Image: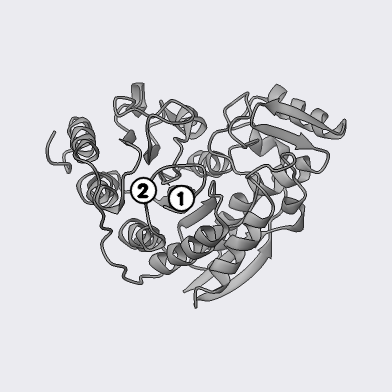
Amino acid sequence: MTVLLYSHPACLLHDGGLGHPERPDRIGAALAGVRASGLQVVERDAPPAPVEALYAVHQPEYVESIEVACASGGRQLDPDTAVVAESWEAALRAAGSGLAAVDDLRRGDGDTAFLAVRPPGHHAGPAAARGFCIFNNIAISAAALVAEGERVAILDWDVHHGDGTQQSFYDSADVLYLTVHQFPFYPGSGWIDETGEGAGSGLTVNVALPADSAGDVLADTVDAIFGPVLQEFAPDWVLVSAGYDAHRADPLAELRFEADDFGWVAERLVSGYRGRSLVFLEGGYDLEAISESSSTTVRGIGGESFPRPTGASSPSAHELVGRACQVAGRHWTNVQGG
């Protein structure tokens, strides 16, 4: 299998501030992991997104405000998120990487794409930077695909709920959003009763796990909910918000997934979409965990088998997966237990 690996030196120049956990070394860790996967890797520069492409997700006034903030030397956008002069190019290239990968995969240049870019994106809303995110990279690619008549599934295993991504497609009939995350936790959204509105009713599937949850409930989530829903929705593309802060070693969160767990999920849910899958680096702040998990992710997409995730999660964690299954079962015939 050939992995198209996108990054750019400009992504290293974005600076969130002294001691900020979303640091440039994260890119090197992800690159090292994909390179060490044993798969054929073709590296490409992430091009900048056309500014107009951002408007499918973000308000033009917001995009302009980010450009102005960077041109003036930078400023703090929210308590967790800042920009410097170099952040404008970094953010454009992070958003543009997915658009380029779609075109390259359609040409048959590779079988999947891994986007080792920063700043990350899944918290960014239509008019707000949040949680280290400036532009919503995965939502911009999804919106471009939808505009071309494609059906898109977004799988988000970052430890934090992707509030910006959910907001972008909450009433869309063409985007399925599957997310498993720690709850209660930043940003405060993502409870199991958030299921979409209007034409998007049922197309947002939140599985909220308590702190200290491990791979056993992740596996149950995939088997009982995500797998059946994905099969029934039958997307043309699967895009992954690959946050590795759900790894047990991450310093900022409290889930206990292992690197192999991400590979198992990728093999179960993404490997069938060769040529139509993108992996976007989101969170994750332990460098070794990022490297190992990036490697297992692309290997899983390539079809490598990993052991079913295990652990000893609390009864409340298992109960929450059961409740999420009941909620999803109201919308999806393939989900049992509704």
Q: How many marks?
A: 2
If the image is split into quadrants, where does the C terminus sit? Answer: top left
- Circle 2 Cα neighbour tier, 10 Å, few/some/many (<14 / 14–19 / ≥20): some
- Which residue position is annotated with label 2? 235
Looking at the image, can residue 317 be seen? yes
Picture coordinates of residue 253 (x, y %)? Answer: 46, 42
Give the SS element for disc 2: loop
Quarter of image, res 319:
top left
Picture coordinates of residue 145 (x, y %)? Answer: 51, 44
Of 51 and 268, the residue lying toward us: 268
Type of amino acid under label 1: Val
- Circle 1 Cα neighbour tier, 10 Å, few/some/many (<14 / 14–19 / ≥20): many
Above or below, 55 relative to 274: above
Picture coordinates of residue 238 (x, y %)? Answer: 42, 51
- Which residue position is annotated with label 1? 240
Of 249 and 155, the residue lying toward us: 249
Type of amino acid under label 2: Pro
Looking at the image, can residue 106 be seen? no
Q: Farthest right residue?
A: 72
Looking at the image, which residue is at 58% across and 38% down?
A: 136
Looking at the image, which residue is at 34% across and 27% down?
A: 191
CA distance separating discs 1 and 2: 13 Å
Above or below, 59 relative to 180: above
Looking at the image, which residue is at 41% across and 70% down?
A: 302
Quarter of image, res 182:
top left
Q: Is residue 24 left or right of residue 209?
A: right
Q: Farthest left residue?
A: 337
Looking at the image, which residue is at 65% across and 35% down?
A: 134
Picture coordinates of residue 75 (x, y %)? Answer: 78, 29
